[in-house]
Image: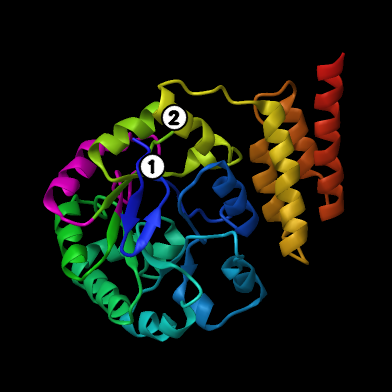
């Protein structure tokens, strides 16, 4: 189950991938997940226009490092011209992933993300353009916008030359209250010849094992938010059939490690964003809700760091008594 996996000319060390997630998968977080075992990671989804009109926030989203490999940049856009204009800006990345699945109203309102599911041919032209520039290209889709047309989408993307395809097992208008339809992912795998990566409701080693029985790779999203160690535990399950338990104290250490990486790579950290993600690390401990409320009251990066350090100290002192 842990055998290596290839996308284009990129050989991955295993078949577990970290999903691109807005407000989560920045460089420091990707590095933590890679250390835990994630074989491939991506930038957050970035709109083509934001890259072309680069500002301080976009530069932070685009930032990478030597240890951050292999790395995919996930882009989205609403027209071929912008995608073509991006081509010179993508050379720092190992692959380019076209997002055709983001269901947010803002992205759909811009006729990008999952809006593109309505237009398989447009997706095909975008993929074809990126491939003609020599990039390893993948696409991330859902089952359809409001109606399931996933096999048509998959075949169009394969025909355009994509090196792999990620399928999230929900329609664009379906929320997390609807279970991801893995049987549809299995159907896609049977109908295309390129690698298929399954996404949606992969929360445990057992989930990963099941997904890898129907797809070439398993993409981990929500389960990794605030728990970068999930990859180590999933890989242990794939090897032994037993998954180690979540360790809240270790997670607080990882929180502090994350903040050290933020300090290293980001001279001006985004405090509201940091508070959102750091709160996700505080789980499985007594008084977690109150602690998260306390964290949300912090105003500066230094205050967040001091609070995180105090959490680890409290945890250590409780262990020694």
> Which mark's residue is nearer the viewer, 1 or 2?
2
Q: Position of residue 222 (x, y in %)?
A: 49, 41
Disc number for residue 53: none
In the displayed structure, 114 sits above or below 198; it is below
Q: Secondary structure at mark 1?
A: loop
Q: Position of residue 263 (x, y in %)?
A: 78, 58
Query: Picture quarter containing residue 296?
Result: top right
Would residue 185 be counted in the magenta stretch? yes
Residue drawn at x 40%, y 36% is 202
Q: Which residue bears the numbered disc 2?
A: 204
Residue drawn at x 72%, y 60% is 270
Residue drawn at x 70%, y 52% is 274
- Binning the other alpha carbons within 10 Å of mark 2 as few (below 14), some (14 to 19) or many (20 upward) gives some
Marks 1 and 2, the one that precedes in the sequence: 1
In the displayed structure, 315 sits above or below 81; it is above
Query: Do the CB atoms of the residues marked 1 and 2 lie less than 8 Å apart?
Result: no
Query: Picture quarter containing residue 265?
Result: bottom right
Q: Position of residue 40 (x, y in %)?
A: 45, 53
Q: Which residue bears the numbered disc 1?
A: 175
Q: Secondary structure at mark 2?
A: loop
Coloration of the structure image:
rainbow
Q: Position of residue 86 (x, y in %)?
A: 43, 81
Would residue 218 be counted in the magenta stretch? no
Q: In terms of depth relative to the viewer, which is nearer, 71 or 120?
A: 71
**Range of residues picked out in magenta:** 166-194
Q: In terms of depth relative to the viewer, which is nearer, 72 or 168?
A: 72
100 sits left or right of 268 in the view = left
């Amino acid at each position: 189950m842990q055998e290596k996996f290839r996308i284009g000319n990129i050989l991955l060390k295993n078949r577990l991938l970290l999903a691109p997630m807005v407000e989560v998968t920045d460089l420091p977080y990707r590095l933590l997940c890679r250390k835990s075992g994630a074989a491939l990671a991506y930038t957050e989804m970035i709109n083509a226009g934001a890259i072309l009109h680069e500002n301080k926030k976009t530069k932070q989203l685009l930032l990478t490092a030597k240890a951050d490999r292999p790395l995919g940049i996930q882009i989205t856009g609403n027209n071929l011209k912008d995608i073509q204009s991006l081509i010179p800006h993508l050379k720092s990345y190992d692959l380019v992933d076209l997002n055709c699945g983001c269901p947010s109203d803002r992205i759909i309102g811009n006729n990008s993300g999952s809006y593109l599911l309505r237009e398989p041919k447009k997706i095909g032209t975008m993929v074809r353009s990126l491939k003609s520039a020599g990039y390893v290209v993948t696409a991330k889709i859902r089952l359809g916008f409001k109606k399931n047309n996933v096999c048509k989408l998959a075949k169009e993307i394969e025909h355009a030359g994509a090196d792999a395809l990620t399928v999230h097992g929900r329609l664009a208008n379906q929320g997390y209250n609807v279970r991801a339809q893995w049987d549809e992912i299995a159907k896609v795998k049977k109908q295309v010849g390129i690698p298929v990566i399954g996404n949606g409701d992969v929360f445990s080693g057992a989930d990963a094992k099941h997904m890898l029985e129907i797809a070439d790779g398993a993409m981990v999203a929500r389960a990794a938010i605030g728990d970068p160690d999930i990859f180590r535990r999933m890989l242990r399950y794939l090897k032994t059939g037993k998954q180690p338990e979540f360790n809240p104290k270790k997670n607080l250490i990882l929180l502090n490690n994350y903040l050290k990486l933020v300090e290293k790579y980001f001279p001006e950290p985004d405090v509201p964003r940091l508070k959102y993600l750091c709160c996700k690390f505080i789980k499985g401990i007594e008084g977690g809700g109150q602690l998260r409320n306390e964290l949300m009251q912090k105003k500066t990066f230094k205050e967040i760091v001091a609070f995180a350090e105090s959490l680890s100290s409290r945890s250590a002192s409780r262990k020694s008594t």
